[in-house]
């Protein structure tokens, strides 16, 4: 069992991660409070997807959230739901790429 991270940096902000035993949704991202909440009644694989999904909400809310809402109220959610599992697969399947991305500055 993996340990849920306590902090997620979505530069320049550092989000506090709260794990709550059981939420109605898998997670939430409160950009005003820099807090990501994840429901504890998920497998580690589900939590990983949720944390990445909520992190993407944090990214979109750094200036793109309002534009997405103008296009379509549900577009941000659709993008997070589409991108999170695919980005997670790239991260898991390509450790060499992740090492390169971390070192190439
Ligand atoms: Zn969402």
Image (cartoon, helix red, strand yellow):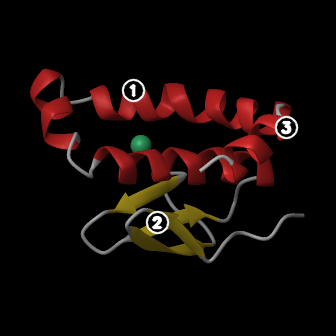
Numbered mark located on residue 96 in the image: 3
Tag in front: 3 or 2: 3
Label 1, label 3: how far apart the Cα atoms are: 29 Å
In terms of depth relative to the viewer, which is nearer, 43 or 61?
Answer: 61
Identity of the residue furthest to the right in this view: 1
Q: Quadrant of ligand 1?
A: top left
Image spot of residue 85 (x, y percent):
64, 32
Tag 1's secondary structure? helix
Image quarter where the N terminus lies is bottom right
Position of 63 with respect to 101 (left or right) is left
**Relative to 86, residue 40 above or below:** below
Image spot of residue 97 (x, y percent):
77, 35
Image spot of residue 72 (x, y percent):
18, 23
Tag 3's secondary structure? helix
According to the image, label 1 marks what residue? 78
Numbered mark located on residue 20 in the image: none
According to the image, label 2 marks what residue? 36
Tag 2's secondary structure? strand
């Amino acid at each position: 069992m993996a340990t849920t991270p306590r902090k997620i940096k979505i530069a320049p902000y550092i989000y506090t991660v709260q794990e709550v035993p059981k939420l109605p949704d898998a997670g939430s991202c409160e950009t005003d409070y820099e807090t990501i909440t994840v429901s504890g009644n998920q497998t580690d694989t589900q939590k990983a997807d949720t944390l990445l999904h909520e992190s993407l909400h944090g990214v979109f809310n750094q200036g793109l959230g309002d534009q997405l809402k103008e296009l379509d109220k549900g577009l941000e959610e659709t993008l997070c739901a589409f991108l999170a599992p695919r980005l997670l697969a790239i991260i898991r399947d390509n450790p060499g790429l992740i090492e390169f991305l971390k070192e190439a500055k």
